[in-house]
Amino acid sequence: ERRRLRDAVAQAKAESTRETEQEKARLAKEHESMREELELMQRQLIAAREASNAQIVQLSKQVQHERDARGGDALEHQQTGEHVRAKLEMAEVKIADLANQLRNAQREHAIEKARLEDQLSEALEVGEGARAHAVNARTVLRRQKGRALRERCFVVWKIKAAAYVALKKQEMEAAETVKAVKKGYEVQIAKTEKACLEKVESMRNKLRGRDPRDANKPALGDSTNQKKGGNKAPRADPWSFLDESTKLEREIAKREREEERRARETVAMALAEEHISKIDEYYAKAAEAARQRDAGRDDPNPEIVMVAHNVSLASHPPPSPLSMPLTAREPRQSKGFVHTYGGDRGATPRSGASSARSMIEPTPPRTAGRVPAP
């Protein structure tokens, strides 16, 4: 027990000694760090004192330099004042000289103004004469332009007339072809129907003319009496009303097909009318746009004239150029249309929207839907 106590005491002493040494080392390190901080602060304090002294010396030098500069500025200001006074005296002399020159210039200006007024009056007289000549030349030019425009319109009229004649010729040929084809089909259909009816009638007569005893034979697997040669209906057939019902059904189906065809034709005509109205609106907008572009022009616009002809030639042959006005402001009527060359320009249609497209008109806007075939 004593040995254990001695060992415990020795261990406690060793631990206390070790802790004491560690504490001493820590305190020594703290002391060293504090000493270094104090030395650093002392050096900073010394540097701050030296910087303050240097700044004081620098400020003293700046103050002395500023005093010297202000003395020089005062001397320079005095010299500048003397120089300005000398300049002022020279300016007064120059002002008197300029006033004398201004009076002389005003006198010369009055003389020059009178001379220019005389020249202006002469120029105005010459300008009035030139204006009269220009008005006369513009009138002559307008007449020449109208003549050239009528010549161009006559060329366009000949082209459109030839196109219209060719179109009518093609339409007549197409109508004759359709008639011939339709007539051929109708004749063939009539022949076929006649042959079928004759065949049916002959078979009915053959069936009706047979011996009644042949019709009472037993059936060969069918609801009607038959023979090996084919279907043979009895003389007093109870199902003969089916022929009439079949004919009635065919007539009803034909009537329904006819009504459906008429409905399709009505819809097609309505869509065609709508399409033609859109074409007319397109031409009207084109003429209006061209009229707005050339609002300040006095001569007729060929583009508006062409658009007007395209509108007016949609449903009938083109009018003769002899019906055109002799002057640019005179309106003329031609087949229900009022043509005005110059002024409002363009053509105002009086007919409805039931016109077809012209042969040489520009492409109109496409419609939204398709026209179904009748």
Image (spheres, rainbow, N blue to C red):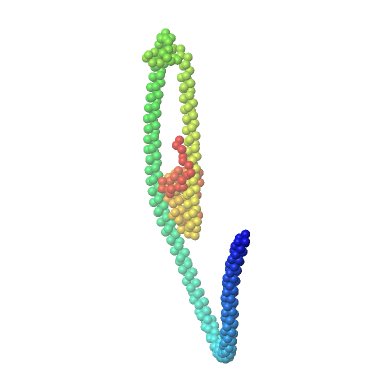
Q: Can residue 55 be seen by looking at this rendering?
A: no
Instruction: Give the percent coordinates (x, y) of residue 262.
Output: 48, 33
Relative vertical location of residue 302 with respect to residue 242 in this rendering, above or below: below
Instruction: Report the front residue among 153 and 334.
Output: 153
Instruction: Report the front residue among 275 and 356.
Output: 275
Instruction: Report the front residue among 155 and 72.
Output: 72
Instruction: Report the front residue among 235 and 11.
Output: 11
Q: Residue at x 42, y 59 (%)?
A: 144
Q: Residue at x 50, y 74 (%)?
A: 120
Instruction: Give the percent coordinates (x, y) of residue 17.
Output: 59, 68
Q: Which residue is drawn at 54% across and 81% down?
A: 110
Q: Can residue 31 be seen by looking at this rendering?
A: yes
The quadrant of the picture occupied by the C terminus is top left
So how many labels did they put on this image? 0
Single out the residue that lies furthest toward the front: 2
Relative vertical location of residue 98 with respect to residue 169 in this rendering, above or below: below
The quadrant of the picture occupied by the N terminus is bottom right
Instruction: Give the percent coordinates (x, y) of residue 346.
Output: 48, 52
Image quarter of residue 180: top left
Relative vertical location of residue 10 with respect to residue 339 in this rendering, above or below: below
Q: Residue at x 40, y 50 (%)?
A: 156
Name the side, left or right, on which 61 lies relative to 189.
right
Instruction: Give the percent coordinates (x, y) of residue 350.
Output: 50, 46
